Every structure is written in C-alpha cells, then in structure tokens.
Amino acid sequence: MVVSQESAAERADRLFHALADGTRREIVVLTLAGEHSVSDLARRFPMSFAAVQKHVAVLERAGLVVKQRHGREQRVRGNAQALAEVRELLDRLEAVWRGRMDRIGEMLAGPGPADSEEDASWP
C-alpha cells in the first residue's frame, strides 16, 4: 500500500481554497465559537442542507473543521490548530513581500554610505 503525503504547497492550496468562500469562512467562525450540528448550520444559511454539507466537507478536507457523528447528528467543531497553520503561511508570505519591498527601497535609494569607491574596486 502506497501512502502519499500532501506537499506543503498542496496543503496551502487546500487551506486557502477552503477559506476563499465567505460561507465557509462563516462556518469556521461559528464552529470555533462552539460545536454545531450540520442541520443547525444549514438553518443559518439561505441554501440547501446539501449545499451546507458540501461546504462542511471542503472545510473538513482542509482540516479547518472536525466532523463527528453523535447519534443521528453530525456535529462540527472548528480546528484552531489549522487556523494557526494558515496564520503561519500568511506570515511567511508577508515576510517574502516585506523582503522584496525592502530590496526595492534599497535599489531606489541608490548607493549608501557603506558603498564607496573602494568597494566598487572589489575583484
């Protein structure tokens, strides 16, 4: 049996895809505040029960929510650890962006005091 591990890029894609939809983001917020049944979630949105189930399934595949069966109900709760992972990814993207902006600023500023004619002659 071959078990493939999800790459970091695939994981990021799955997380950001799940959070790209407003309804799914609202479901995450609700389920982080407390556990809800899928039926309860479905009553909160102007869409079919099946549509809400699909949104929950996308969130579950991304690891943003955990779904458990309690009798006839499926209960959904948010996964704060997955949100911490999203925050980490965003922090890394911000660091890349800030680094690029700093380099652009340095290029626009021109040679600084550390840059002298002596430095220009470096082999």
Image: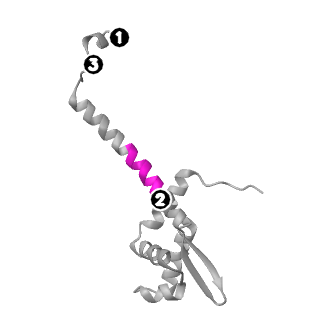
User: In the figure, 37 relative to 89: above or below?
Assistant: below
Q: Label 1 crowding class (10 Å Cα cut-off): few <14, some 14-19, many 20+? A: few
Q: Which residues are magenta?
A: 86-96
- Looking at the picture, which amino acid does disc 3 mark? Asp
Q: Label 3 crowding class (10 Å Cα cut-off): few <14, some 14-19, many 20+? A: few
Residue at mark 3: 115
Could you tell me which secondary element the residue under label 1 belongs to? loop
User: In the figure, 17 relative to 41: above or below?
Assistant: above
Q: Are marks 2 and 3 in contact (CB under 8 Å)?
A: no
C-alpha separation, residue under disc 2 versus residue under disc 1 = 44 Å
- Location of residue 120 (image quadrant): top left
Q: Is residue 113 left or right of residue 3?
A: left
Q: Earlier in the sequence, mark 2 or mark 3?
A: 2
104, 54: nearer the viewer: 104
Q: Is residue 101 left or right of residue 22?
A: left
Camera-nearest label, 3 or 1: 3
Could you tell me which secondary element the residue under label 2 belongs to? helix
Is 92 covered by the magenta stretch?
yes
The x and y percentages for residue 110 are: 22, 26
Residue at mark 1: 122
Residue at mark 2: 86
Q: Are marks 3 and 1 in contact (CB under 8 Å)?
A: no
Task: Determine if residue 103 is in view.
Answer: yes
